[in-house]
Amino acid sequence: MRGYITNQFTEKNYSKNELSTIHKRLIYNHIGWIYSLRSQLLVPTPWEHASQNSLVKKYAERTREVFGVGLFGDDITENQRI
């Protein structure tokens, strides 16, 4: 990350403190994007059969628990379930 944000090709030279602030902001934005992507990818899709009311739903939930696929049991993803 630090190799992409330098004073090498700029007209105005930034101080080390300013560059550090830019690096932190980029890293925090990237972490936020990763968590947003995680939340979106953990939402069950129609082909996972999690929304059906039958033996298929129970089997899909059991498979998710055994193999760790799909939503985790935390507050954030539980509140975002479709």
Image (tube, helix red, strand yellow):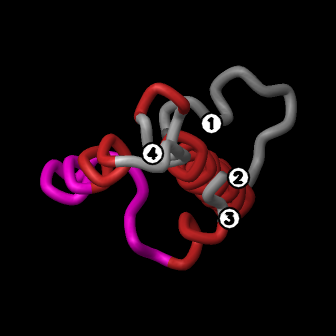
* First in residue order: circle 3 vs circle 2: 3
Give the x, y percent position of residue 44.
Answer: 51, 43
Pointer 1: what residue?
Answer: 5
Using the rendered image of the protein, determine whether residue 6 is visible from the camera's viewpoint. yes
**For the residue labelled by badge 3, is the local secondary structure a helix, a strand or a loop?**
helix
Three-letter amino acid code at the position of disc 2:
Ile
Nearest to the observer: residue 30 or residue 77: 77
Inter-mark Cα distance, 2 to 1: 8 Å
Foreground label between 2 and 4 = 4
Residue 16, image quadrant: bottom right
The image shows residue 77, relative to residue 59, as above or below, that is below
Pointer 4: what residue?
Answer: 50
Give the x, y percent position of residue 33.
Answer: 63, 46
Foreground label between 3 and 1 = 1
* First in residue order: circle 2 vs circle 1: 1
**For the residue labelled by badge 4, is the local secondary structure a helix, a strand or a loop?**
loop
* First in residue order: circle 2 vs circle 4: 2
Three-letter amino acid code at the position of disc 4:
Ala
Pointer 3: what residue?
Answer: 17
* First in residue order: circle 1 vs circle 4: 1
Residue contact between numbered discs 2 and 1, judged by CB atoms under 8 Å:
yes
Inter-mark Cα distance, 3 to 2: 9 Å
Residue contact between numbered discs 3 and 4, judged by CB atoms under 8 Å:
no
**For the residue labelled by badge 2, is the local secondary structure a helix, a strand or a loop?**
helix
* First in residue order: circle 3 vs circle 4: 3
